[in-house]
């Protein structure tokens, strides 16, 4: 990683947990991400997930371009047991309020998991790693999590980690559903603020331990 790339990632490198490691997204990850997505697309209706290798390379290229502008910090999710990729996640929409070099508020999103990694504790640990870095290293005042308001599965997962529902943002962004890319979507917005972080952290640690 070049020093410029490191600076644009606001100091974040690999985040290592018990089950997974969140590694910086690189151009060569496209093939493995396409393999992770697999053929079972039944749970991918509301997010952008590679359809094939060419699509994966396009997604990776776009994400790295966004990262080069300081708008995202992108990760692949690697299984620490067999070194395979299980999906992807990222920080996005960094906000700067207090004239610091690192974000004061951040969103966690763009998360998708291979079918075999769903309901296994991978998402819980990934959220724990991302929130821990955001609150404990950057010192953010807030972490956002949002999803398509229709995505009840994703909303339940966000609520499970302890984020607080703030409301529906009407026509907040373009839909990520295939065939709806020219339409707006309503987004369900959740957050964790700094004062809530110790309790949420404890909750995530307990959930992770229950999966061990």
Image (cartoon, helix red, strand yellow):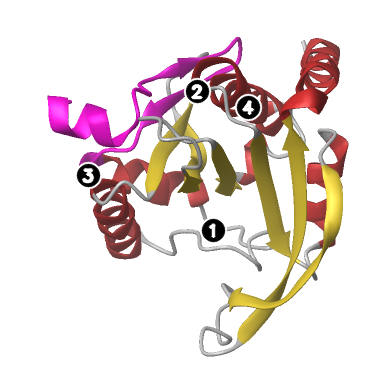
Residue at 85 percent of width and 19 percent of height: 199
Helix, strand, or loop for circle 3?
A: helix
- Mark 1 or 2, nearer chain start: 1
Q: CA distance from mark 4 to mark 3?
A: 25 Å
The 10 Å Cα crowd at callout 4, few under 14, some 14 to 19, many 20 or more, is: many
Residue corresponding to mark 2: 138
The 10 Å Cα crowd at callout 2, few under 14, some 14 to 19, many 20 or more, is: many
Name the quadrant containing residue 107: top right
Q: Is the Cβ of the residue at disc 4 closer than 8 Å to that at disc 3?
A: no
Q: Is residue 53 left or right of residue 119?
A: left
Against 55, is 212 above or below? above
Q: Is the Cβ of the residue at disc 1 closer than 8 Å to that at disc 4?
A: no
Residue at 60 percent of width and 15 percent of height: 19
Residue at 24 percent of width and 30 percent of height: 7
Residue bounds of the magenta highlight: 1-28
Against 48, is 172 above or below? below
Against 16, is 62 above or below? below
Query: Is 64 covered by the magenta stretch?
Result: no
Q: Is residue 186 left or right of residue 61?
A: right
Helix, strand, or loop for circle 1?
A: loop
Seen from the viewer's position, the closer of residues 42 and 195 is 195
Q: Is the Cβ of the residue at disc 1 closer than 8 Å to that at disc 3?
A: no
């Amino acid at each position: 990683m070049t020093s410029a790339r490191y600076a644009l990632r606001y100091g974040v490198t690999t985040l290592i947990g018990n089950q997974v490691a969140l590694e910086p997204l690189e151009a060569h990850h496209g093939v493995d991400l396409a393999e992770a997505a697999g053929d079972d697309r039944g749970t991918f209706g509301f997010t952008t997930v590679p359809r094939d290798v060419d699509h994966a390379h396009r997604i990776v290229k776009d994400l790295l371009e966004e990262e080069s502008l300081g708008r995202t910090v992108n990760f692949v999710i690697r299984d620490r047991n067999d070194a395979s990729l299980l999906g992807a996640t990222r920080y996005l929409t960094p906000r700067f309020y207090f004239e610091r070099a690192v974000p004061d508020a951040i969103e966690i999103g763009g998360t998708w998991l291979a079918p075999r990694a769903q309901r296994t504790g991978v998402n819980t640990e990934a959220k724990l790693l991302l929130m821990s870095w955001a609150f404990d290293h950057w010192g953010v005042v807030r972490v956002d999590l949002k999803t398509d308001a229709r995505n009840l599965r994703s909303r339940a997962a966000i609520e499970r980690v302890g984020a607080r529902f703030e409301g529906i943002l009407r026509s907040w962004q373009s839909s990520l559903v295939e065939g709806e890319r020219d339409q707006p979507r309503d987004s369900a917005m959740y957050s964790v603020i700094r004062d809530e972080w110790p309790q949420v952290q404890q909750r995530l640690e307990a959930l992770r331990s229950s999966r061990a």
